[in-house]
Image (cartoon, helix red, strand yellow):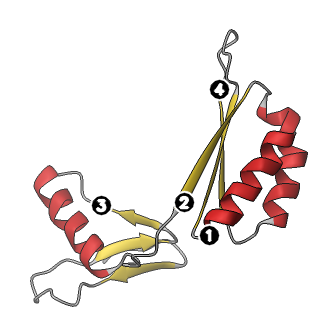
Amino acid sequence: MAVLPENSQLRIPSNGGPETWPILQCGRVFVLPGVPQFFEEKLGIICENFLNKSKEKKYLRKIHLSADEVDIVHFLDQVVAQFSELDFGSYPFFEEDAVVKTVITVEGSSEDSVKTAAAELVRM
């Protein structure tokens, strides 16, 4: 018997037989085995059965900034709130002599929204 983390799910593939082991999912994270053969098998099952199969086109913009992430977080939060339908990423670089100190990504299904949000970020 095993104790599973709170709010986790055992995902059983629809095409699996009685010998198919379930896959543990904790939120948006799948816990996979470390043995390469089993890892590859489970990864294929996840892609076939549990991931969103939407063919909706995604648009992506990357903004490279010379500002530290901590210095722009307030403005970034405002843009994120304004464009809640988009996904944002913020990736700081900590090297002292780095020219680029933060990379911001903007992703979404509306090209116009992605362009507008990226333009707002560049204005800062």
Secondary structure category for the residue under label 1: loop
- Amino acid type at circle 1 is Ser
Q: Earlier in the sequence, mark 3 or mark 1?
A: 3
Q: Quick one: 53 or 62, which is closer to the camera?
A: 62
Which residue carries the number 3 mark?
32
Distance in Å between CA atoms under marks 4 and 2: 24 Å
Q: Residue at x 30, y 78 (%)?
A: 1
Disc 1 + disc 2, Cβ < 8 Å: yes
Q: Earlier in the sequence, mark 3 or mark 2?
A: 3
Q: Residue at x 70, y 72 (%)?
A: 85
Label 3 or label 2, whichever lies nearer to me, is 2
Neighbor class of circle 3 (other Cα within 10 Å; few <14, some 14-19, many 20+) is some
Give coordinates of residue 80: x percent, y percent. Answer: 79, 59
Which residue carries the number 4 mark?
93
Label 3 or label 1, whichever lies nearer to me, is 1
- Amino acid type at circle 2 is Tyr
Q: Earlier in the sequence, mark 1 or mark 2?
A: 2
Q: Residue at x 84, y 43 (%)?
A: 73
Which residue carries the number 1 mark?
110
Secondary structure category for the residue under label 4: loop
Which residue carries the number 2 mark?
59
In the rendered view, would you say 55 is above or below 78?
Answer: below
